[in-house]
Image: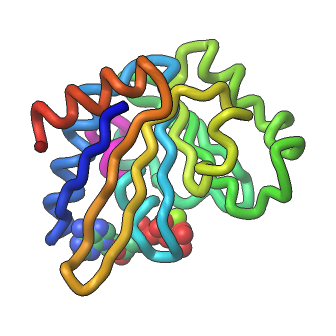
Amino acid sequence: MSDLLLRLPTRRATVRLACALAAALGPGDLLVLSGGLGAGKTFLARALARALGVPRDIAVTSPTFTLVHELPGRIPIAHADVYRLGGADELEPLGLRERRAEGALVVAEWAAPFVDALGGDAIVVELDHDAAGRHARVRSTGERADEVVRALAARCG
Ligand SMILES: Nc1ncnc2c1ncn2[C@@H]1O[C@H](COP(=O)(O)OP(=O)(O)OP(=O)(O)O)[C@@H](O)[C@H]1O
Ligand SMILES: [Mg+2]
């Protein structure tokens, strides 16, 4: 499976990553955003939504309390934040697996522990910052996700 390490020294670099993701992602894909508080998960989700054509008058914010926001992009987007979820059983009522089956792109913050419960085959973006600055590690957990990460590597690698 592919594994890509990208440096994100500026917000613009993150926006470029979002544009490359927008070009590579399709209906039914699962994008998992992980990384600690303030790592840039929602910033990346917002840039991706804009790159997929979500109008600027629709706010893209962390759906921490509502858990899922539906966003009208070129591909319909279900944006979730599962930080508060106790376990995989609490995921079921959110209907995210169903949204994938219906052709939505699911973008889920804090969802790394729930990849299987969300139907697997995820593109996982781990955002981090250390002394060397911000970076993203992008990996795939299935065949379709691998295709996406390879397309991303061709653009950003
Ligand atoms: N590559 C970058 N360089 C500099 N700043 C960045 C970069 N990417 C994002 N940021 C900034 O970092 C902050 C990240 O906040 P954001 O809300 O996206 O984090 P988060 O991971 O969703 O946090 P939380 O888990 O608390 O919801 C934003 O203020 C954003 O402007
Ligand atoms: Mg957030």
95 or 34: which is nearer to us? 34
Q: Which quadrant of the view contains residue 144?
A: top left
* Relative image position of residue 85 (x, y in whole percent): 79, 56
Q: Which quadrant of the view contains residue 23?
A: top left
Looking at the image, which residue is at 52% across and 76% down?
37
Please check the rendered image and state whether residue 98 is part of the magenta-colored stretch, yes or no. Answer: no
Secondary structure predominantly adopted by residues drawn in magenta:
helix
Looking at the image, which residue is at 63% across and 14% down?
101
Considering every residue shown, the one lying at the far top of the view is 102
Considering every residue shown, the one lying at the far right of the view is 89
For the N terminus, the quadrant is: top left
The vertical placement of 57 against 7, above or below, is above
140 or 27: which is nearer to us? 140
In the drawing, does residue 146 fall left or right of residue 109? left
Q: How is the image coloured?
A: rainbow
Q: Which residues are magenta?
A: 46-54
Q: Which quadrant of the view contains residue 106?
A: top right
44 or 89: which is nearer to us? 89
The vertical placement of 133 against 59, above or below, is below
Count of marks, rendered view: 0
Looking at the image, which residue is at 85% across and 35% down?
93
In the drawing, does residue 146 fall left or right of residue 31? left
In the drawing, does residue 35 fall left or right of residue 62? left
118 or 103: which is nearer to us? 118
* Relative image position of residue 48 (x, y in whole percent): 33, 43
* Relative image position of residue 9 (x, y in whole percent): 15, 71
Considering every residue shown, the one lying at the far bottom of the view is 131
